[in-house]
Amino acid sequence: MVAPYKLASSNNGKPRSQVREWRWNAITNYTFTEGRLKALSVGGALRWLDKGGIGFLGKPPEADGVIRELDGSKPVFDKARLAVDLSATYRLRFVRDRVRARVQLNVRNVQEDGRLQAVGVNPNGTRFAYRIIDPRQFILSTTFDL
């Protein structure tokens, strides 16, 4: 029961597990104003996350071969991640220009095929907890203004 307290005290002032120190987001959009593509807008976004701690390796095993304490100086990290999103919007009018509509396609996490991502490690370094990362998502939406 002393091991969690020892680990907490050895990590005092260090980054917390599961918390990434740095992240940034960038978003852009371009609307065509002339020519054949006049009603079209295209955009994209980037989301970057710094590496994140997912646990600690254990100290050397005791005489009976059991690891009873974690070593606060040996963190295990998940790698940094980059996510890409894309969007396209088309605006149109019909019924003598009285009804305006917008059709939008968003693709979230373009490069992602879906996977399990480790979020916890045992003292020997093997992963024991995972979260599900969804594959890319296609979202089609339509709005009308009367």
Image (spheres, rainbow, N blue to C red):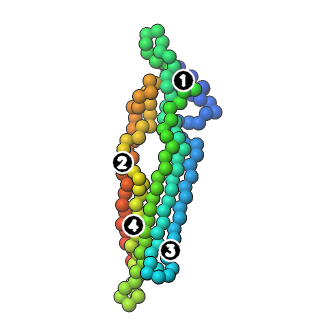
Please tell me which of labels 2 and 1 falls first in the chain. 1
Q: Amino acid at mark 2?
A: Gly
Disc 2: which residue: 114
C-alpha separation, residue under disc 1 versus residue under disc 4: 48 Å
C-alpha separation, residue under disc 3 versus residue under disc 2: 31 Å
> Observer-nearest residue: 38 or 100?
38
Disc 4: which residue: 105
> Observer-nearest residue: 42 or 9?
42
Q: Amino acid at mark 3?
A: Thr
Residue 17 visible in the picture: yes
Q: Is residue 115 above or below residue 53?
A: below
Mark 1 secondary-structure assignment: strand
Rendered image: mark on residue 71? 1
C-alpha separation, residue under disc 3 versus residue under disc 4: 15 Å
Q: Is residue 124 above or below residue 83?
A: above
Please tell me which of labels 3 and 2 falls first in the chain. 3
Rendered image: mark on residue 31? 3
C-alpha separation, residue under disc 1 versus residue under disc 3: 54 Å
